Image (tube, rainbow, N blue to C red):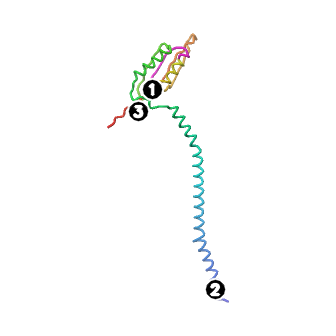
């Protein structure tokens, strides 16, 4: 019986070693691979869902782009290459005259230079009715030069006759000439 028991123990040990070897060297590595493949599949599914959602947004983004392009218009044409400050100040004075604004004062400020775009602050003052001042600002919008209004101050006259004093801080732009060489 001793020999049989030893033989059975040996068979159990060999069978246990085979099962352990199978579990350690075959089953566990395959489980790790299966988990890695499942994670990769989940990541791909997420990426596909995200791309699908983003592709549905493309028409809306195209619409926004077209709207912005219409709003901006031909930006380059409204920012001249030359400073042309005198021409601009003359146009402002003409617009004020066309709208019958009085006590006009137009003063350019200190020019600010940057790499591609330079700006000149311009201070404007005048008096007139609110309708005249409103029309003046409407005509500023259609100028062939970009004008950014930074501040407007409207003050009623002291006797409330309907006349309004206007003080405006604006900025005009022009593109810097880059030296080519």
Q: Main secondary structure of the magenta part?
A: strand
Quarter occupied by residue 89: top left
Q: Disc 2 marks which residue?
A: 7
**If you read the primary sequence from the N terminus, does the residue marked by circle 1 or circle 3 appear first?**
3
Marks 1,3: beta carbons within 8 A: no
Q: CA distance from mark 2 to mark 1?
A: 102 Å
At label 1, counting other C-alpha atoms closer than 10 Å, the crowd grade (few under 14, some 14-19, many 20 or more) is many
SS at mark 2?
Answer: helix
Image height of 96 relative to 83, above or below? above
In this rendering, position of residue 161 left or right of residue 102: right
> Which of 156 and 86 lies nearest the eye of the viewer?
86
The percent coordinates of residue 46 (x first, y second) are: 59, 52
> Which of 144 and 155 lies nearest the eye of the viewer?
144
Q: Disc 3 marks which residue?
A: 114
Q: Disc 1 marks which residue?
A: 172
Q: Residue at x 65, y 84 (%)?
A: 8
Quarter occupied by residue 115: top left
The percent coordinates of residue 139 (x first, y second) are: 50, 21
Q: Residue at x 57, y 41 (%)?
A: 59
Quarter occupied by residue 45: bottom right
The percent coordinates of residue 17 (x first, y second) are: 60, 77
SS at mark 3?
Answer: loop
The span shown in magenta is: 119-132
Image height of 8 relative to 71, above or below? below
Image quadrant containing the C terminus = top left
Q: CA distance from mark 1 to mark 3?
A: 13 Å
């Amino acid at each position: 019986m001793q020999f049989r028991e030893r033989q059975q123990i040996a068979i159990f040990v060999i069978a246990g070693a085979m099962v352990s070897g199978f579990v350690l060297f075959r089953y566990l590595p395959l489980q790790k691979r299966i988990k890695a493949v499942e994670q990769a599949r989940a990541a791909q599914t997420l990426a596909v869902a995200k791309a699908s959602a983003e592709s549905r947004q493309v028409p809306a983004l195209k619409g926004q782009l077209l709207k912005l392009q219409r709003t901006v218009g031909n930006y380059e044409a409204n920012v001249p290459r030359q400073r042309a400050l005198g021409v601009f100040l003359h146009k402002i004075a003409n617009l004020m005259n066309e709208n019958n604004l009085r006590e006009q004062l137009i003063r350019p400020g200190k020019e600010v230079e940057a790499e591609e775009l330079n700006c000149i602050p311009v201070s404007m003052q005048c008096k007139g009715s609110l309708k005249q001042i409103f029309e003046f600002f409407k005509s500023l919008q259609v100028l062939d030069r970009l004008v950014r209004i930074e501040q407007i101050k409207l003050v009623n006259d002291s006797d409330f006759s309907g006349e309004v004093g206007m003080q405006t801080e604006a900025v005009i732009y022009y593109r810097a000439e880059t030296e080519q060489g």
